Amino acid sequence: MDTLHSLQSRLDSLSALFNPRAIAVVGASANPQKIGGIPVDYLRRFGYEGRLYAVNPTTDQVQGLPAHASLQSIGAPVDLAILSVPAARVEDAVEDAIAAGVRGLVLFSSGYAEIGGDGVAAQQRLGRRVREAGVRLIGPNCLGFMNLRTQVYATFSPAPGVGRVAPGRIGLVSQSGAFGAYAYAMARERGVGLSLWATTGNEADVQFADCLAWLARDPGTDVIMGYMEGCRDGERLREALALAQAAGKPVVMVKVGQTALGAEAAASHTAALAGDDAVYEAVMRRHGVMRAHTLTEFFDLAHSAAVAGRPRDRSLGLFTLSGGVGALMADAAHAQGLDVRPLSPQAQATLREWVPFAAPRNPVDITGQVTNDFSLMERSARLMLQDQGFASWMGFLAAAGASEAFWPVLRSLVASLRAAFPDTLLAISTLMPAARRAELEAMRCLVFADPSDGIRTITRLAGQAPRAVAEPDSRGAPIRLAPGAMSEPAALGLLAECGVPVVAHRWVHGAAEAADAAQSMGGAVALKVVSADLPHKTEAGGVMLGLEGATAVQAAYRELQARVAQRRPDATQDGALVARMVQGGTECIAGVRQDPVFGPVLLVGLGGIHAEVLRDVAVRVLPVDREEALAMVRELRAFAVLDGARGRPPADLDGLADTLCALADLARRAGDTLESAEINPLIVRPRSEGGCVAVDALVVGRSPSPPAAGAAHAIGTEGQA
């Protein structure tokens, strides 16, 4: 990870880019409808207060500004140069900017990594050059950015020309220009104010994560919205998300693409189950990101977070004037896993003194009696919050918000609660005009027409309680794996060395030796072919189960060798593995794989249909400690199977967590020489018997990856210059 000094340097350089005191438009056009004319028009028309220069060597004047032949000929400092020139002229324009001491560039031009071939090489050269010169570049192939606070419109998007978004405290970053422009229009239509709007295009230099990190440190931004298609620097993204989390700034993210591209080359089930989208989901969850799956949800969550912030925990007090709606809210809150704890007996008794027929637990229902005594509402709400200290409070007030007589009471209620409980998330469900809703939102109170929408929003804002996961101490010396799949005996030996209990087994090279091994183990055994060419032995007929007695094992060994030779004549056989059959317990799958973006990823799930068909697995990006390993197990949809459902004995969860930690330790010790390690099945014994046992193991090594710095890619390319 970058040092604090280099991180601070990156953020400082972006500050110069996003807050320029002088801007030059290179390729400036006199036509305000052309790409080179739009930013000049916006900057002049919308009140940019810094110095503005036009660079166009073919004319004397551009939209009322004197035209300069080059950036160097301006003869004054320029913080930001907007480059609107054909790709063939970009290199000259960049060199002119470097010579002129320009600190930041926005490059609209296309014809780079998005077209492949020579475009990739040109983008790599461009990225290297600006980094060498210490100049920050957004693009190429992007729509640029807008700083709404300072009226910087470094964009050719037509969206501001239709109508501008008001300055606000929400930052929006998009890798896609088309999505970014549409999101800008949605923000305008929904009255959402923005601090910064930025599109990153092909990301030859400035990445999505860089913009996110800058917003995390920006005092004018409270909430961050992000649209992401992909990432090539996982450490930088996690660093940015950690900055936002530490600053208490909610992040709402749309992440598209649910493929498993990074897992296609891997040999294990773990790679397919812990595909790209599952890993991104794990990273977002670790850092408290609220993932949105629709544009409506994207803006609803961001707006709600900007109004009310995020509650400190999942506790919720519910207040209602209708018993039926109170039950509806309670059911929804319980279904969402919110903490709807009852009031204390003393508080309940007080409420009954005020309203003998009230329902005083939680939800608190004081019925229509409030129409006879408006003070009941405020007294009840205060009592609830003083008694239990709920992180969130929500009141259902029917259509009272539209009542002229009731509006002053409601406004006074919110003002009083906000003053007395400044850190509590407040929400009201009622019908009211837009102006009244805006007045309550100005007091940091959410307003919902549908109480169920309110419960869902509070749930998303509450999220899961964040916890720091420290890098555990490694248990052993570094391990360097050779590329390719290890033999199963070697894989079991490696797992045992790292602390994973493995099945009793012996590697044999003949029928008689197999029979001797089975006899020494006693009971039923499994026989599995050993072949570096067969990571999945069953498909080649290389597994025989439930063998008992020396004669049966000898015959099975010969049959196994012949069957595999017939089905896979290309596979080299190196004897067989004799392993004791394990009876009872619950089959699980556990594994770790190297994600190309985020590094080692840990997975656990129930075996069989739960993993393969239902994809009931939990995924984490390392580091993972024991508490986090237990949390992974408990979040499985089929956790009840492990927890003793329908009379089954509870499984040894502690032993399962220990095994997951051992796999994580293997990943740390092997570093980037590990492609994947999988235990399938991992038999988890009942708690009364204790422990787990790895029955089948697959470990795949790989050649260490070369550094990826400066790699060119194209994202967010649709509908741009």
Image: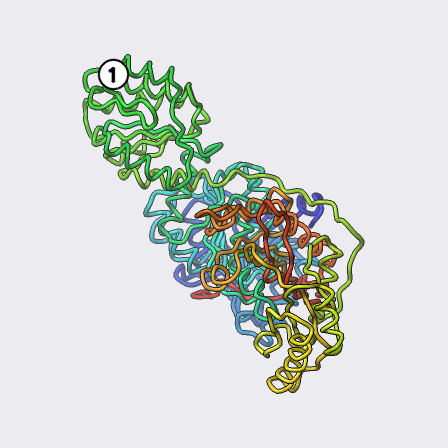
* 22 or 517, nearer to the observer: 517
* Left/right of residue 514 with respect to residue 327 in the rendered view: right
How is the structure coloured here? rainbow
* Left/right of residue 97 with respect to residue 141 in the rendered view: right
Q: Which residue appears at 66% of the width and 85% of the height? A: 570
| Whether residue 426 is situated above or below residue 543 in the rendered picture | above
| Whether residue 129 is situated above or below residue 404 in the rendered picture | below
Q: Quadrant of residue 587?
A: bottom right
Decide if residue 73 is in sight here. no
Q: Amino acid at mark 1?
A: Val
* 170 or 526, nearer to the observer: 526
Q: Quadrant of residue 432?
A: top left
* Number of disc labels: 1
Pointer 1 residue: 355
* 564 or 219, nearer to the observer: 564
* Left/right of residue 662 with respect to residue 422 in the rendered view: right
Query: Circle 1: is it few (<14), some (14-19), or many (20+) Cα within 10 Å?
Result: some
How far from the left and from the top, in percent, is residue 121? 63, 72
How far from the left and from the top, in percent, is residue 609? 47, 62
| Whether residue 419 is situated above or below residue 476 in the rendered picture | above
Decide if residue 114 is in sight here. yes
| Whether residue 32 is situated above or below residue 407 in the rendered picture | below
SS for dot 1: loop
Quick one: which residue is furthest to the top in this view? Answer: 353
How far from the left and from the top, in percent, is residue 163? 34, 49
